[in-house]
Image (cartoon, rainbow, N blue to C red):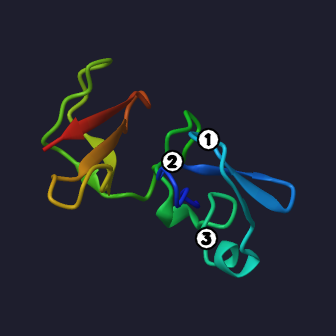
Amino acid sequence: MQFCEECGSMMKADGDRMVCTGCEAVSLRDKDQEAAFVSTDTQTGAELVESDASANFEGKPIASDVRCDDCGNDEAWYTIKQTGAADEPPTRFFKCTECGYRWRGYS
């Protein structure tokens, strides 16, 4: 992601140049800098938040201190992701082991 030096807004690619979404300033694309960027196309499964309904939670840790709002089961697979700032608690993503219902838990 590249930010505008003039106004600080995010810039978007337009061919071989970058255009600011705020003030429309233009700069050349830095191919060396772009090589360091990570996109979801190149991230591994361990780095992604499983938000798709068909995401495979099986094999993840199981929490037994939760209750599914859909079926009442008291076990769910979970993953933990830091979705906010570093000084905020992480978010737990759950999937019911019985019915597959999905929800988030905030600490």
Residue wearing tag 2: 9
Residue wearing tag 3: 37
Residue wearing tag 1: 21
- Residue 34 x/y as whole percent: 68, 72
37 left or right, relative to 5? right
Q: Residue furthest right?
A: 15
Q: Secondary structure at mark 3?
A: loop
Query: Are the residues at dot 1 and dot 2 in contact (C-beta closer than 8 Å)?
Result: yes
Q: Quadrant of the N terminus?
A: bottom right
The amino acid at mark 2 is: Ser
- Residue 36 x/y as whole percent: 61, 78
Reply above or below: 37 against 59: below
Going from N to C along the chain, the mark reached first, 2 or 3, is 2
- Residue 106 x/y as whole percent: 19, 40
Nearest the eye: 7 or 89:
7
Which residue is drawn at the image coordinates 22% and 53% (left, top)?
90
The amino acid at mark 3 is: Phe
Nearest the eye: 5 or 79:
5
